Image (tube, rainbow, N blue to C red):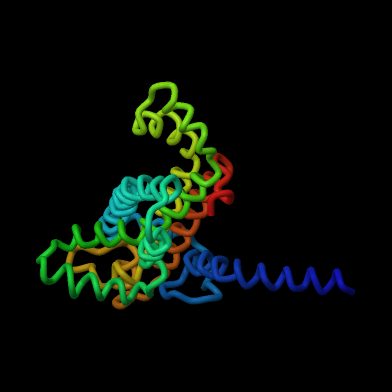
Amino acid sequence: MKHVANWSILGLTLVFLIGPFVIIILAGASAGQNLAFPPEGLSLKWYAKVFTIESFRASFLLSMELAIFGTLMALLLGVPAAYALNRYDIPGAETVRTVVAAPIIVPGIIVGLALLRYFVVPLNMTITLALFLAHTALVLPYAVRVVSSSMHNLRADMEEAAVLLGCTRFQAFIKVVLPNIRGGVLAAFILGFVTSFNQVPVSLFLSGPGVRTLPIDMLAYMEITFDPSVAALSALLAFMSLAIVFVAERLLGFSRYV
């Protein structure tokens, strides 16, 4: 009886987690003209239509650029920060960690409004630059935390041995530390990429006419059109994210870092 209850709970949990994906996939495969579930027949025409919508293509490219370059910038800032926090006795280190984590602790709506009100408008930033800086700030906490976890598992005496053998601190970092934490750095990049690409609240405040990320463009599209193409695109994005995480887990052991 106990086993039946356990399996029942597991089954309900899987339905709760996977059910929405199944609904979206089937809704996107509807043969009808309106977004509905159960679907009115099955067809792949809406999946094909996704690739013909110009605004989706443009916003997809913008989201890819923001996710890639924003994550790279976050790593450029986050890796040295993680190194310093793990290798040096910095006064107020816990305060620094809390400040760095603020973008993921504070609700995204507040972050977006604050950036818009106190940075974008007063400094007259372009929308693209504002989005880039915002996505970098949002990904930075993940870069610091994941790389810090990887740094914590690296023995400090390996680096000290390289210094004793004649390397400078920078050379020891490049030749010894970085190769040994590359798995954590790549895991941080993948986590940051997925987080940035799917980001909504902050992007909602900072997007503007002609410059919208893909999630924001999908919201705008649904305001004027209620066909299943948005469901089809949502399913494709879900598959893309799952594929990225699956490959990362197979190649890097992604779960060790997050």
**On-image quarter of the N terminus:** bottom right
Residue at point 38% right, 46% down? 79
Inspect this view and state whether residue 34 appears. Answer: yes
Image x and y of residue 40, in percent: 52, 73
Q: Give the left or right position of residue 190, taking residue 253 as reference.
A: left
Task: Pinpoint residue 221: horizontal percent, then vertical percent.
Answer: 31, 71
52 lies above or below 28: above
Q: Nearer the viewer, residue 122 or 14?
A: 122
| Residue 163 picture quarter | top left
Q: Is 225 rendered above or below residue 167?
A: below
Please name the residue shown 31% across and 76% down the image: 110
What is the x, y in percent for residue 166? 39, 22
Q: Quadrant of residue 92?
A: bottom left
Determine whether, in the image, residue 159 is placed left or right of residue 81: right
Q: Residue at x 35, y 45 (%)?
A: 80
Q: Residue furthest right?
A: 1
At 38% from the left and 32% from the top, the residue drawn is 174
How many dots with numbers? 0
Residue 193 showing in the rendered view:
no
- Left or right relative to 254: residue 119: left
Towards the viewer: 218 or 112: 112
Q: Residue furthest top?
A: 165
Residue 219 drawn above or below residue 141? below
The residue lying toward the viewer, choosing from 137 and 252, is 137
